[in-house]
Image (spheres, rainbow, N blue to C red):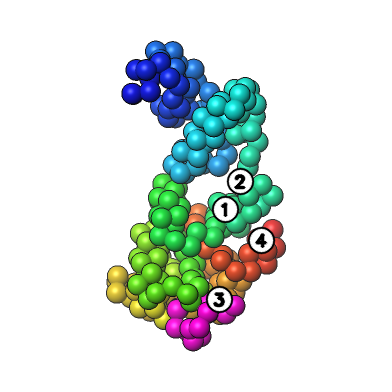
Amino acid sequence: QTALAEGKTAIVYHESNIEIRTGSDSEILMPVSDIPTTLNGAAEHNVANAMGVTGLSLGLGVTTEFIKQGLANFKGDVNDNPGRGNYFDANGARVLIDFAHNPHSLAAIIKTVKALPAKRRLIMIGHAGDRTDRDIRNLTAVALKMEPDVVVTAEIPDYLRGRELYEITNLMRDECLKTGLTDEQVVYSESCLAGAEFALSWAQPGDFMLLLALDQRDKVFQLLQ
């Protein structure tokens, strides 16, 4: 509001559209439904990213037509942005691959996922060993905000970084059980690839799976493709 009052330009998200406002003038750039990475606005962090890109591009003198083309053509798939918000269909179930590995980035993904319909939800989580026990528990607590029916705790053998095998997954399992999940709802996996294989065997049409593939990502992509 301050910028607009001073006659400056602001990028605004209003009624599912990204708008360019200068003073009292307003121009709709495009609806977020035309920006694939926003998932029709459910991915609020990518709506914010699109707004930031718009403002930066305008500042660099890029025309609105080129901005619209760029936002519409960036699919966020394994070709455009591997490992960040990549969606797949698996026999009627939806799979999201991401390598969010800190509470802030994971919270943004979880917020998006919860806005999407699903019969059942599964999340696969893992962590590197050079984090404190508290960090690992905190990340697990954020993951549980997805309210999953199943949690796959994936071992990442190449990233133990001084910890023993099972140490990290046991911390995550303990955090899951503390929140009320049962033993049957917390599934151990020896690797990210094995965890993804389990998820696909578990899935039914209408289910949603968030796989935080911090390792073996290319193999997980191959499995889904």
Is the residue 151 above or below the residue 72 in the image?
below
Q: Is residue 163 magenta?
A: yes
Mark 3 lies on residue: 159
Q: Residue at x 36, y 67 (%)?
A: 138
Marks 1 and 3 in Cβ contact (< 8 Å): no
Report the side of 169 relative to 158 (left or right): left
Q: In the rendered view of the protein, which quadrant contains the N terminus?
A: top left
Q: Residue at x 55, y 42 (%)?
A: 37
Segment tinted magenta in the rendering: 155-169
Instruction: Judge by depth and name the residue closer to the eye, 104 or 140.
Output: 104
Mark 2 lies on residue: 76
Amino acid type, residue under disc 2 in the picture: Gly
Is the residue 122 above or below the residue 104 in the image?
below
Q: Which mark is residue 84?
A: 1
Rendering quarter of residue 102: bottom left
Amino acid type, residue under disc 1 in the picture: Arg
Marks 4 and 2 in Cβ contact (< 8 Å): no
Q: Tag 4 or tag 3, which sits nearer the N-term?
A: 3
Sort mark 3 into few (<14), some (14-19) or many (20+) by Cα contacts within 10 Å: some
Q: In the rendered view of the protein, which quadrant contains the C terminus?
A: bottom right
Mark 4 lies on residue: 221
Q: CA distance from mark 3 to mark 4?
A: 20 Å
Q: Tag 3 or tag 1, which sits nearer the N-term?
A: 1
Q: Tag 3 or tag 2, which sits nearer the N-term?
A: 2
Q: Is residue 132 magenta?
A: no
Secondary structure type for disc 4: helix
Mark in the foreground, 4 or 2? 2
